[in-house]
Each structure stands twice: as structure tokens, then as C-alpha cells.
Image (tube, grey):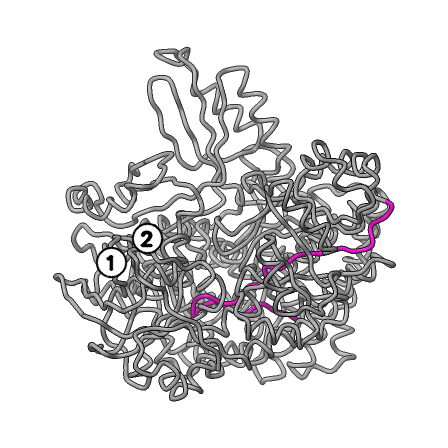
Amino acid sequence: MSQTPPRWIVLKFGGTSVSSLASWETIAGVVRRRLEEGVRPVVVHSALRGVTDLLGVLPARALEHTHVALLSEIGERHDRLAAELGLPPEEVEALLREDRRELSELAEGAALLREVTPRTRARILAVGERLATRLGAAFLARRGIPCAWVDARDLLVSVEARDGSDASAHLSAECDAAPDAAAAARLSSIEGVPLTQGFVARNAAGETVVLGRGGSDTAAAYIAGKLSAERLEIWTDVPGMFTADPRIVPSARLLRQLDYREAQEIATTGSKVLHPRCIPALRDQAVPIHIFSTLSPEVQGTVIRRDAEEGPAQVKAISRKTDVVLVSMETVGMWQEVGFLAEAFDVFRRAGLSIDLVSTSETDVTVSLDAGANLLERETLDALVEELGRLCRVTVIRPCAAVSLVGRRIRAMLHRLGPALEVFEQQRIHLVTQAASDLNLTVVVDEHQADRLVRLLHAQLIAEGGSPEVFGPSWERLRASDERAPRREPRWWERKRAALLERLGADACAYVYDLETVDARLGVLTSIDAVDRVLFAMKANANAEVMERVRVAGVGFECVSPGEIERVLALFPDLPASDILFTPNFAAREEYRVGLERGVRTTLDSVYPLRRWPELFDGAALFVRLDPGIGRGHHEKVRTAGRHAKFGVPLFELDEVGELAARAGARIVGLHAHSGSGILTPGHWEQVGDTLAMAASRLPDVEVLDVGGGFGVPEKPAQDALDMTAVADGLRRIREASPGKALWVEPGRFVVAEAGVLLARVTQTKGKGEVRYVGIAAGMNSLIRPALYGAYHEIVNLTRLEEKSTERVNVVGPICESGDVLGLDRLLPPTEEGDVLLVANAGAYGYVMSSRYNLRDPAPERCM
């Protein structure tokens, strides 16, 4: 009698979901429940959070002979998790010894040979999953779950790369997901729960290959396909796909069910929840995909299946993909020419570049490239432009973003989209495409406009209603009702609610700054051992009481104008001039003269002053602001580096700056860089420091490396805070690698943003169909960031802080401008005239950017 085949379920867990004891307890619970259901689970999981990124930069560190510290950091991350999981050190050493030895040998080999091939890079990247899964299997076994580690390379064999390149074959491999009796027999023979790596496979020659970014999703899908599994479960840190990215639109709604094509479209147009390549692997076999969150496992997330509800023509998601590069090819010669497109596209093929979108006219073809997916380095793009230039005139447009309306039968509802598409009226539109599948309409715009447009479109097109079979609760409601979600500490304005309302008194609006929060932020910065000097970028907030706290903390000031210098010296007449760094931009000759006569440390932002006014700088000790080449930040308008930013001396002019300074009788004693504001990537400042240190080697008198500011604060509830411990570790490495050099930082927003709120009374409420408005006494004349940047500020009803939020509204001000909107689609309790709304994170670039537009006074400042 034949044995009944197992009912397979593949469980895939992402990097965030395998990086803590709490997550592993959830994983153990999920595995137990599946066993109790009578199915056979296979666990597939990723490397620990952030480890693949570290392994990605290891080859470059090896070539610089600076890889030893990075190897130690990778080892320490796994040791810390093992200790948290309760695994004995001697067991961990035995489990990980061979993998650690291989990783060390690969790095040493790269350092010795001064070469890293795609084959070597793949072997390095693959180690992260092996280290993590060995720990995971040991933990489950200690929790009483029979578990066996299985090498994914025994299950997955890659197929030949379509472009034939060695890089694609080893670093972006593909496998076959067809039912595989041998793989099923291999796993069936294992006693207990098989646990294996994502991301990793082997080729026909037995060499290790990896499946590219998001490869763990894809590996799990391949295994589910080979086993003809009942379903694939993707466990991540969000409970499914949403109508927009919740980090941009907190009111985004959970999509309960999608068919494969819709999910594929949402994934390819920018959603990070599910990798696009994992969906086709299961579509033909109709294996459903269920998405769950390890943070809230009881929430029924998104189900992707063949028989998902058809429903009417409707938009289901607003997606955006950043880091898009457009290549425009123009020539009259293409008109009615046979084979032009084939010849042009073959250039992209030979360069190993995949084209996303295509738009054509009689004399122009424009295509888009996903820079991230294509690993689009400058050399690759330059070579592409040179070769295409033999066929046509080439224009490269970047940075761009693709904003997509994704749904069903988009063409049937174009007439209804007209009013919503008015949001593009003032935007520069580079390309418009409508998918042949009738599943999306995509508009490519300048990257800095994308988040704002997503919020506007979502507010207009994703209504509160819709079929409950398709549209679930919003991200905000899920977070509020999730008792398992990490409970954050109450913000200062929640703790001091009564005092805030009293501070406002009978006034209509006011900025209020909490000086205790300012002190705490300053304390975080001054406690970083590797930093020799902290300067406060006072353009963020010039309030006298705030600046007094800065001074008491022993922090200096970074000024961008003579007016700011005079304000500092008026407040603190005894302040040494050396405690002020003057960093003007495109300033007149007179401003440099004022800075030098005042004796403050003065920064050159351009080679122009040394070329045209060398006599000003005779005997001066100068700083030079460099452009490190890449800007970062929460919005394009606050990214202050890169060729599209006006700030800084490009690195290719550094030698000329040194020569001109010497000729003028000046010394360059400091190098400074500032790439933007609101940066939440902790490794950023170490990268800037590396750039400054290399530049300093070309200038003999440099004593100071100033890595700038831009330390980010979370703007939205879904964002994590900047890991300042990781920032401090990176700065410590820079300090150790640059003996004899002082290390400076100059934050502004980090010190004051969260310390300030804007309070404003409700003046009126109004409803227009499904859209409700709440008007307040403060508008864009008080806080211009939402109108100028599309910036997001959390808004709450301070009067009714304890009441449940049930109404979705737009919060607007009294200024006679359609752009006077402080918050779109916000969830508030029922709100009435006279209530006090609080706009959070308003302490930076709020009052200092205010105006008397419409001859309305801005909100005044107060401290508490």
C-alpha cells in the first residue's frame, strides 16, 4: 500500500524575524502550530538583519586591507544572538567554526590577490545564511522541536543565466520551481523539521551561487514549487501588502487578498514586502502565498492566490519606486527605420542591464532602469551612453521615481482618474506608461516629489470603503490594536499634556519647546567618545533659550550667515570665536571678510573665492566643504551632496583648492562634508569619514575631519529611530583609522526636532462628500515644511488624546493657498471647534522658516 505523501508547508522568515529571542519564540510557536495541524513544515530563513549588507562591503574592505574589524563585527553579531538564544558558547563555536574559517580565508585571499571575482563574491555572501540557519536549527532543537539543518545547495540548482554573464550566473541566479521528486524524497527522509537557507543555491558545476536581492523569498518559492506545497508562508515584519508603503502613508490599508498578477505588479512597482521573482515561481502551480508578521502573528495578512475576488475596476495600491534612471535616445534616423530598437536594446543586453519601462515616439525612445536591481555603477552607465551614442543622441535623467497606480482594469476607469491626476499638474513628468496587462498606470517624475504624490493620490483614490474581502484595516489601526507590538515610551508631549495646554493658554497657536528633551539629545551627542567637538547647526532653531542649553552643554555653533554669527555673539559675548564654524554657501565676498575679521572658523564651499579673492585669505586657517558625491536624507530638497546639489567642492577640484590656498598664503586645516538631513542609515557617517580621511591624505595641514550632521529622527510611526550606538561605533573606527585628526559633528535637527511641537486651535470643520477637513489657526506661514518638502508630521488631538481615533481628515490652515495642508488623510477622534491639535517634530526648521504671508503673524515661540 503506497504511503500518503506529506502535506508540505514552506515557512520563510526574513532577517528582522530571525534576529532576536522574541522573534525566535514566535517562530517556534508557528512551527509547533503547523505540526499540530498535521502538515510538514520546512523552514527557510535569511541572514541576520544587516549581515548581508556587511558581507556585501567585505570584498572592498579586503582590497583595502581593512577587513579584520568587519569580520569581527559579523562574528560578534552572531555571538550576541547565540547568547540571547541561550546556546552554549562551546556549541556555537563547533556549529560556526567551518563557516567562519571559510569567510576569513575568502577575505584574506581577496586581500592577497587584489581581486574579487563574482564567484568569490557569491561565496562570501552565502556565508550569512549558513551562520544564521545553524543557530536557528540549534535553537528549535533546544525548544523541543526536532529539527535538521539542510544545505539549500542540495535542493536548489541554478539554470543557465539568460545573458550568459558570470556576474548574473553567480550573483543573480535563477532556479527551476517545477515539482521535483528527488528534492521531496530528500526532505521526506529527514526526521523532524527541515531548516535551510534562503538566498543560496549551487550551479551545475557544484559552485555556490546566490539568488540576488530578495533571494530568500525566491528560494522559499522554489522549494515550495518543488514540493508542490499546500502554501508558502512569508513571515516578515509587516502583516501583508498594503495600499501604499506605511512608512510614507500611515493610513495605508491592508490588502486581504490579491491574485498573482496584482501582487506581481505591486511588488515590481516598489513594494518591499515580497520579492517579485517569488510569485511567478508559484503561479503556474497555483501554490498560494500567505504573508504574516512575526510581530503580530494573529493578524490574518495578505493571501495571494489564483481565485482571488475579481471585483470591479479599481485602484488597489499606490506604489513608488525610487532610484530610477531614465535613458532617452533621440534621432530622426529611427523614424521608419527597421531594426533600430533591436540594435539599441542589444546595447543594454550586452551591458547586462534590464529595462523596466519603455516610451516611444517617432524620433525618441525613453527607457527606465532600476539602479538598485541593475547594480548600476557609474562606469557601467558611462559605457552604455558611449556605445548608444554611436546610434543616437543620449540623455540620462536621474534621480527619478516611478509612481504607479496599481489595480484591476485601469483603462476602464481612466475617466474617473482625471481629478486625481491633477496632482501631477505642477510636476515635471518625464514618462507615462500604461501596462499592456491593464494592471497599472505609471508616471515617472523627479524623485523628490514621489512621496508627496503618493500621499496625495492615496488620499484621493483609496477610500475608507471598498470591499472588506479586499481592503482590511489601516496600518495605524493595526498598530494601535496590536497588543504584541513593541510599546514605545510616551513622548514628552504625552507626559506633559496638561502643562502644554496650560502653556498655550487662550492663544490660538504657538510653538512650544521642551528644554529637557533638548538637554537629553545634547547628552547623546556629547557622550560619543570618538567625537572631539559637537557643533549645533543653529539654522534649525535660533531660539535664545534653546541656544542657552546648547552653550551650557559645551557645544559650539555652526552658522551659515553673518546674521547667525552676530546672534550667537550677542547672546554669548564671551564665547571664543573658535567655537563658531561659519559655512556660507554662494556667499558674497563681504561675508567671507566678516567671518575672517570676527576670527571664526571659516569654510570654503567652492574654489571660486580662492580663484577670485585670494588676498582675503592670506594667513587664514580654512575649512573646506567637500561634496562626497552622494546625498542622503528624508527628502530630495534636504540632500546637500551629489551633482544635483549646490553644496561643496567636488573631489576632482581638491588638488586645485590645495594649490590655490598655498598660493594665497592660507592653510587648509579642516575638511567638512554634509550630505543631507534626516538620515537614518547608521553607517553613513563612517562612509563620509572614510572619504574625508582619503582627501586629507592629499592636504598636509588638515587637523579636523567634520562629518557633518543629518542625524535623523523618525518622522512616521512606522520608522525606527537612528541607532546611535552603531553611529558611535562607526565614528570610533574612523577615529582609530585617522590618528592625529580631530573628529567633529554638527547636528541641528537631531537636537531640536522632537523637542518642539506646534499647537493650534481648531477653527472650523467641514465635509465635502467622503473628504473631511479640520481647519486650524496655524498654517503654512507657521510651518512650511509640508508644503515645501511634502514633509510628514504626526498630528494628534491633544484635547482628546485619550479618545479613540475614528475619523479620517485633512488638516488645513487659514492661508489662501491650496497647498496650505499640514496633514493629509489623518486619523483623529471626532474633533470640534476649540480643540487643540498638536503637530509633532516641529522644533527644527519650523519658526525659523516662518513668514507673514497673507499678513498673518506666525505662531510665537515658548519654552517649558
Q: Is residue 717 magenta?
A: yes
**Disc 1 or 2, which lies upstream in sequence?**
2
Q: Position of residue 12 (x, y in %)?
A: 50, 65
- The image shows residue 675, relative to residue 83, as above or below, that is above
Is 352 within the magenta? no
> Decide: marks 1, 2 in contact (CB < 8 A)?
yes
Give the quadrant of the N terminus. bottom left
- At label 2, the amino acid type is Ile
Q: Which residue is mark 2?
A: 318
Mark 1 lies on residue: 462
* Local secondary structure at mark 1: loop
Asked which secondary structure carries label 2, the reply is: strand
Q: Percent from the top left, x then y, of residue 607? A: 69, 36
Q: Which residues are magenta?
A: 700-724
- Residue 344, position as x, y percentages in the image: 48, 21
Classify mark 1: residues with Cα within 10 Å, few (<14), some (14-19) or many (20+): many
